[in-house]
Image (tube, helix red, strand yellow):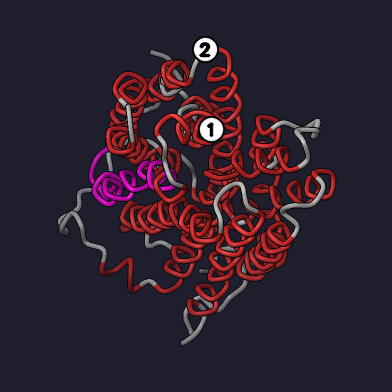
Amino acid sequence: MMRLQGRAVVWGMALAQLGSLLPHVVVPSVLAQFLIPEWKLTAAEAGLLAGSYAAGYMLAVPVLATLTDRMDARLILLAGSALSAIATVLFGVFADGLWTGAACWSIAGIGFAGAYMPGLKALTDRLAPGDSSRAVTLYTSAFSIGVGFSFLVSQLVAESLGWRSAFFITAAGPLAMILVCLLLQPVKPKPVSRRLLDFGPVVRNRAAMGFVLSYGAHCFELYGVRTWLVAFWTFVVASHGGSSLVSPVAVSFVFSLLAMPASVMGNEAALRIGRHRAITAIMLSSATLALLIGLLADKSPWLLLPLIALYAVTVPADSGALTAGMTMAAHPDYRGATMAVHSTVGFGSSALGSWGVGAALDAAGGTASAAGWLAAFAVLSAGIALGPLALWWSRHEGVGTSNSPNAG
């Protein structure tokens, strides 16, 4: 059988990500137009439904990502991709309300827990050490393009064939990652004698934990806005008599599409001016933009559109730099365990972001209220502003104080 080698591994994994992520935001895509009215959900309940994916991921990833220090990560990637596809079909068949939907969607999140970080480990295990930063950034940046196509395909299919069909069609995407798994060279990790869930050395690695906690702030904002972007732009269009030429489908797609170049540029900035400095500047810019969008939520779509475009750059721009920083700061023997903590914190924060924005909307007037959206974006702004605090903490007491790319 032909096996992928060298750069083909990087490009193969990055392209397979596009398929793996096709089901990723089906629920947020159909939430405002279909699920909220059909299931009579409050905004907090809708956030809970969307966040159940991240919650399932958070519960499974400590075990699945840590196992990659003990067995070939591609085997976990293979199983996770299959479960992701199956659970997406189950949602389309069985979901008929908040709790059945949350159960199916959390299983899909468990499947993705076996796909994303194990996929990153499968990639880095097959690279020379000097190749990791840009390869990791390409892999994480492909995530954003995959999410963009998930938004696009889900909404177009739901509008033409019904929302259940959106789940059936996007469920085929993870088959691409299954194919790439079969083409990867087997890798046997070094034997390990420590306990499976041995996270003590990870937590004591202050340089790595700075990136992990900052990634939590990043995911809170990222998933908060991904869950509610379609609903927000639906409000903007409705507030102006439906006159905007830019539809929620287009806004959500372009928002995600801009993430790949933004993440690449963010990592390049980190390599040039220092990882901590670049990430801090990006996060503070993002917090400012979120607050500004909230304050102008009821203004013209043509005023909001450039702000949303800028926000589409700042939200993901720190992603590649954070993940690459974490992998480089991790001890080689605990890289899988560090990735597990990284993902657990990140996706736990993701679930909190989806629900927290929904709760803020409910408390301040709902999705049809400008005050509700001001509260929502204020919550996003406060969440991302915690990221620079985590980086500041990680650099004190003499740990991770260098600004070189290979430092924590």
Q: Quadrant of residue 70?
A: top left
Q: Secondary structure at mark 1?
A: helix
Mark linked to residue 29: 1
Q: Amino acid at mark 1?
A: Ser
The segment highlighted magenta reads: 46-72
Name the residue nearer the viewer: 146 or 293: 293
Q: Is residue 59 magenta?
A: yes
Label 1 Cα neighbours within 10 Å, binned few <14 / some 14-19 / many ≥20: many
Task: Check disc 2 and report the residue beneath it.
Answer: 161
Q: Is residue 356 magenta?
A: no
Q: In the shown orientation, is residue 107 left or right of residue 237?
A: left
Q: In the shown orientation, is residue 98 left or right of residue 17?
A: left
Residue 242: x, y in percent?
75, 33
Name the residue nearer the viewer: 105 or 192: 105
Location of residue 347 with respect to 386 vertically, above or below: above
Location of residue 196 with respect to 102 vertically, above or below: below
Residue 246: x, y in percent?
77, 32
Residue that appears at 20% across and 57% down:
197
Residue 252: x, y in percent?
64, 36
**Quarter holding the N terminus?**
top left
Label 2 Cα neighbours within 10 Å, binned few <14 / some 14-19 / many ≥20: few
Q: Amino acid at mark 2?
A: Leu
Residue 103, can we see it?
yes
Residue that appears at 39% across and 33% down:
39
Q: In the shown orientation, is residue 316 left or right of residue 206?
A: right
Q: In the shown orientation, is residue 242 left or right of residue 332?
A: right
Residue 54: x, y in percent?
38, 46
Mark positioned earlier in the residue sequence (1 or 2):
1
Q: What type of secondary structure mainly makes up the magenta span?
A: helix
Residue that appears at 59% across and 39% down:
144
Residue that appears at 43% across and 46% down:
42
Q: Secondary structure at mark 2?
A: helix
